[in-house]
Amino acid sequence: MGHEASIFRTERKLGLAFTLPIFILIFLLMGFPFAYTIYLSLTNKTVGMPATFVGLANYISIFTDPTYWRIVGNTVIYTVICIVVKLVLGMLFALLLNEKFHGRAITRVAMLLPWAIPGMVAANTWKWMYNDQYGIINEILRDLHLISTPIPWLGSMNLALFSVIIVNIWRGVPFFLFSILGALQSIDDQLYDAGKIDGANVFQRFFNITLPSIMPVVAISTLLSTIWTFNDFDNIWLITGGGPLNASSVIATYTYEQAFMYNDMARGMAVAVSVVPVLLILMVLVMKHRSTNE
Amino acid sequence: MKSLKHSYIAKRVMIYVAAIVGIVWSCFPVYWMIKSSLTPNDEMYELHPSLIPSRLTLDHYKQLFTQSEFMTFFWNSLYVAVITTAIAIILSILASYAMTRLRFRGRSFIRKAIFYAYLLPTAVLFIPMYMMISKIGMINDRNSLIIVYQTIVIPYACYMLISYFAAIPKSLEEAAFVDGCTHIGALIKVVLPIAAPGIAVVATFSFTMSWNEYLYAMVLTTSPSQQTVPVGISSFRYSDNMIWGLIMSSSVIASLPAVILYMLAQRFMVTGLAAGGVKQ
Amino acid sequence: MNKAFKVLVCALMLALCMGGIFASGSAEQDKLIIWDKSEYVGAYNELARARFEEFCAANGVEGEYVIVPPNDLRQRLYAAIEGGNPPDIVVTDDFMAKQFAGMGQLADVSDIKTSLPFIQAGLNVSFCEDGEYIVPIAMLAPGLYLRADKWAEAGLDYPTTWEELREDARIINDPENDFYALGYPMGTSGGGDAEGMCRAVILAFGGVPVDVEGNVTVNSPETLAALEFIASLYEEGLCPPSAITWDDMGNNTAYLAGSVGVIQNSGSLYSQLRTDNPELFENTIILPFMAGPAGSFAPTGSNCFIIFENGGSVDMAKKYVTEFFDMDFYKNLVIQMGGMWQPVIEGADDDPFWEDPENSGWLANSLGGVPNTYPAPVNDATNRAFSEQVCVRAVQKIVLQGMDPQQALNELEADFNRILGK
């Protein structure tokens, strides 16, 4: 009994010692900015001026502004489409790379590239490719006689959001692909053999054996990627700046625009804080799900 | 038998078609970036760009290396990314080990709470972060980036490492304890070797994250002697001209370290991510 | 007790470590720091840097010369102001500088402005109701670039009014062959070109966005006609489809590529054409701004210095700014800009360079321009309205959302009231 207790004591000490550094780093480093942001959202802060407390005025102002709700809508569309497509494509290509074929190594390296390229570089390159006059995308479509006049990929109300979604998907597929591929390769082949003997077809094997085995990895990857996509700023800001007329604006870029282009810091902060509860609920749900799974 | 062969061939064809689609989809923008970086200025703004360049030039690279401070940005980025990754990985290994193997009060709280660092986008955090860094006198110091980037890298690293560690059977360590190992001994001798590929992957991703970061780097550093590559690339935008040649050539160079790292880590990539799923 | 103690020791050691890292960073309080604008003409930044370093060496101060791309300036400066750590001197556009004038952050520079012989145009463009905070460096006169060869091909005379320009454009326009008559950027990326163009048309049509007394008078039939006119240039396809979202570089690149017939730009492009594309240079003619029923207006901006009170070295900064206008240095610097800049100091135009007909036009333009916010009182609010590109947004709403022009104008009026009402 005494031995047990001493082990427990050691674990407690070590546990605290090991987690303290990240606790200090993350909480001290994020604590102040976080609290300060919430505080500013309750004031009328602009740059260079002292802040006066105004209560919930900023929140009332944004919640009654139709533009805000459009931006929320854009954010949901952006996040959901990006995540779903990235997940599906990532899964399909992971299944592909899980097969043995000539050139698999090369394919694997090639498909990893988009993730290795800095986001800002990707944004610049895509912006260059989307250019309606010198861009290669329109040129290819014209050569194929699919279009006769150039398409303003970034200049149309209907296309701008779609165009930035494509870039996010391009960048994000490898993350899903390689996470899922890892999980796939750790599935015991015997499970499949057993499945075959039971007469399960390809789809049954996928849904009964493959999917359950990779589910934990899919869940983590989806959560991480959702948060990253939701807060994605560089991609949209560098390609369309959220335009035209906020057509491709999401919470992250709208916040920035309000705070730094219009110097309405307080309102910008309020926009950012307004979606925190949603993210929080999302995180709690996924983590709860995860801990029950373990 | 024949139909089996047919379906085999059909499957092969599908695999190769899919592989080609995947390669083109992933590589085309990269190809276009490299092609643009080699295109002479007077052909850059052609109305009908051709897929295959007619003339190539190294002028943009020459200009990049001789007339800009790009190499300073490059070394700064390398410095920041390597040290950030090293610190984040060491701290995350310790923390993740504690959170999967040690029982202590507050464990589940910390484990859940790490993620809260991602609740607000950097697009709003950079002003308070600047104020804080400024209070401790570290403005315009690349070392400040190493501290700030921990908030981006650690949550990710911990989350991945926790899942790797959790998948390693406890029985392996218990054998080590019987041999008289301490917790730290078990971590180093048993857990780390098994999780090594996974750690390599997390390190690679962490490196990329800090290598790519733009907003914090832009506001926290002001002199070229302290700035990183993304800030450097954005500085090739003059008052109302974008120098596409310089932007594209610097982009190619900026992509190299991460790409090389990925090539090296590539073989761990699959086994590493799979390590999380070592069978119990 | 023991373990709690150990944990405490660990925590303390970590705190010390972090403190050590923090302390190793040095605070740069006594340095003279200048944030300069990155200019397309590379010679500028080299000359300005050399000048600054020379000054610092001569005065025994440590100095730091930093080039900031205009797109990054705002957020960096905001962060620096909030951190209580702004640079000493900033070089920027006047409409940007004027927004900082209302913040109580800038040092009064009336002594510099009275001690140097600034020309009237320079004083006008740097005047701000909020106080004497802005020292002009150079005028950035815009000009209308027109493809003389295309006009000759069609046998047309050069246009003088906006209406004529549109009529000519309908003839010149050739989208089938990727040639568009006009290349006016209309994106809200934060530069001044698009809003400047809108204001020029509104004024020419007789509209007055904000009157001399600061009343919002934008909602008039004249402004409505102007907005409809601008929108028609995009709706009729006289500009490339994406021009409605171009930033300030869109027109430059399009013109360089030979895909548009008319753009409005400063002299920067002119000097670039001369070296990079002699053929296009030969085919280019610079015209005065188009006129409307109420006349011709060319909103003209400038580069300028502002000095931050909190920077810590106000006196040294003022000394530098004053010595920057040393006649030999300044005269040469402006000429090195190849027509993009026009001098703001009496006598600095006394050089054969400015007698060359290719350059004298820019000089004349710089003297005849109006401030960006004309005829409104010049203060931080009116400049904020310019900087937020409210008129551009109104045009975008008509073109992209198909909004009724009167409705867009009503919303424009509301935007002006929101910004000026504060």
Image: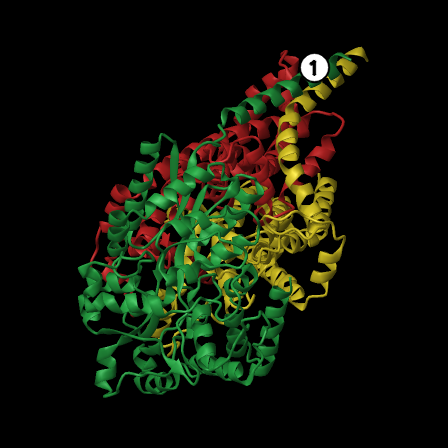
The picture places residue C32, in percent across and down from the top left corner, at 42, 36
- Using a 10 Å C-alpha cutoff, classify the residue at mark 1 as few (fewer than 14 neighbours), some (14 to 19) or many (20 or more): few
Please identify the quarter of the rendering in which residue B125 is found.
top right
Q: Which chain carries label 1?
A: C
Residue at (42% x, 32% y) in the render:
B79
Give whichever of B47, C266 is nearer the camera. Answer: C266
Give whichever of C68, B22 is nearer the camera. Answer: C68
Give the chain coloured red.
Answer: B
Give the chain coloured green.
Answer: C
Residue at the spot of label 1: C6
The picture places residue A207, in percent across and down from the top left corner, at 63, 54
Give whichever of A238, C227 is nearer the camera. Answer: C227
Q: Is residue B46 visible?
A: no
Q: In this view, does A144 lie above or below C34?
A: below
Give the chain coloured yellow.
Answer: A
Give the amino acid type for the residue marked by disc 1 in the picture: Lys
Residue at (46% x, 40% y) in the render:
C314
Please identify the quarter of the rendering in which residue B43 is found.
bottom left
Q: In this view, does A149 lie above or below B215?
A: below
Q: Is residue A269 above or below residue C262?
A: above
Residue at (59% x, 36% y) in the render:
B132
B144 left or right, relative to C149: right
The picture places residue C346, in percent across and down from the top left corner, at 30, 57
